[in-house]
Image (cartoon, helix red, strand yellow):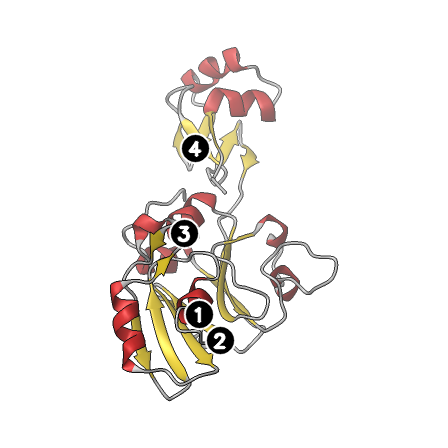
Amino acid sequence: MESRTSRLDRFISQNSEFSRSETRLLIAQKRILLNGQAAHSVQQKVSQFTHIMLDGACLNDKQPVYIRLHKPKGVVSATKDTQHTTVLDLIDHPQKSELHIAGRLDRNTTGLVLLTNDGAWSRKISLPETKLSKTYEVTVSKPITCEYAEAFRKGIYFQYEGITTQPAQLVITSDYTARLTLVEGKYHQVKRMFGYFDNEVLALHRTSVGEYTLVGLAEGESSVLTSEEVRHYQPGLKYTV
């Protein structure tokens, strides 16, 4: 989902009694403030999070929301579902109807889910070019050998798509468990990587996405990240705020 932007004159015509042609005069009279500063051009771009005042009245004061959630098993990564509990059902926030998911998890996969109303931010987090690491705890049905780690490091070939996965780090923690860190999120990727060795994934738990973790969150709990925390954790990304 992309964050919506619009020319200032178009926004004014859609959200006030003034026309697009009248916006130029409003700007000249310094009657429009964008984030506390006088507007200077009808062509200025405003986003869904631009604070816009006209003659002292607020036309837009929407705030960006960033939430981390500890998803339990059986909860679906969707905003609506008639049969199952959704991640939004677990969140108590006045803007939760605006939220979408930045990186879904399967219904039976547990762990960290990020939600936001900032489309530009979630898109950048999801882009393959960002190479944002994601770490999972994996439990499988057969013993894991050192051969797995080497194959994951080199990349696993997916014949159906004709592609090879990016190098991934596998740390074996017991005969049947491992910690896997990868920088992409192809369809059922973790299960398919272990499927290369005919080894069924019995449980999958995402512990982190980049610097975002589950620290302090019990299963089913969520917390709001501030814009400052978002910038701190992802200094390479640009924001609409």
Q: Earlier in the sequence, mark 4 or mark 3?
A: 4
Residue where numbered disc 3 is placed = 126
- SS for dot 1: helix
Q: Position of residue 45 (x, y in %)?
A: 41, 28
Mark 1–mark 4 Cα distance, whole angstroms, equals 53 Å
Distance Cα–Cα, label 3 vs label 2: 26 Å
Residue 180 seen: yes
What residue is disc 1 on?
195
Name which of mark 3 and mark 2 comes first in the sequence.
Answer: 3
- Tell which circle, 3 or 1, labels the residue nearer the N-terminal end: 3
Front position in the image: 26 or 71: 71
For mark 2, give the secondary structure. Answer: loop
Does 156 sit left or right of 20 as displayed? left
Report, in whole angstroms, how far the alpha carbon at label 3 lies from the one at label 1: 24 Å
Residue at image coords 46%, 24%? 8
Point 50% across, 63% down: residue: 113
Instruction: Of the two numbered discs 1 and 4 on the same chain, state the one appearing first in sequence.
Output: 4
Q: Residues within 10 Å of mark 3 (few under 14, many from 20)?
A: some
Mark 1 in CB contact with mark 2 (< 8 angstroms): yes
Residue 112 position in % (x across, y down): 48, 68
Q: Which residue is mark 4?
A: 34
The amino acid pointed to by label 2 is: Glu
Which circle's residue, 2 or 4, is located before the other in the chain?
Answer: 4
Q: Residues within 10 Å of mark 4 (few under 14, many from 20)?
A: some
Q: Which mark is residue 200?
A: 2
> Is there CB contact under 8 Å for labels 3 and 2?
no
Amino acid tagged 1: Gly
Image spot of residue 104 (x, y percent): 51, 59
Which residue is painted at 49% across and 75% down in the image? 200
User: Residue 230, how many percent across, how many down?
Assistant: 38, 57
Q: Amino acid at mark 3?
A: Ser
Residue 213 appears in the rendering? no
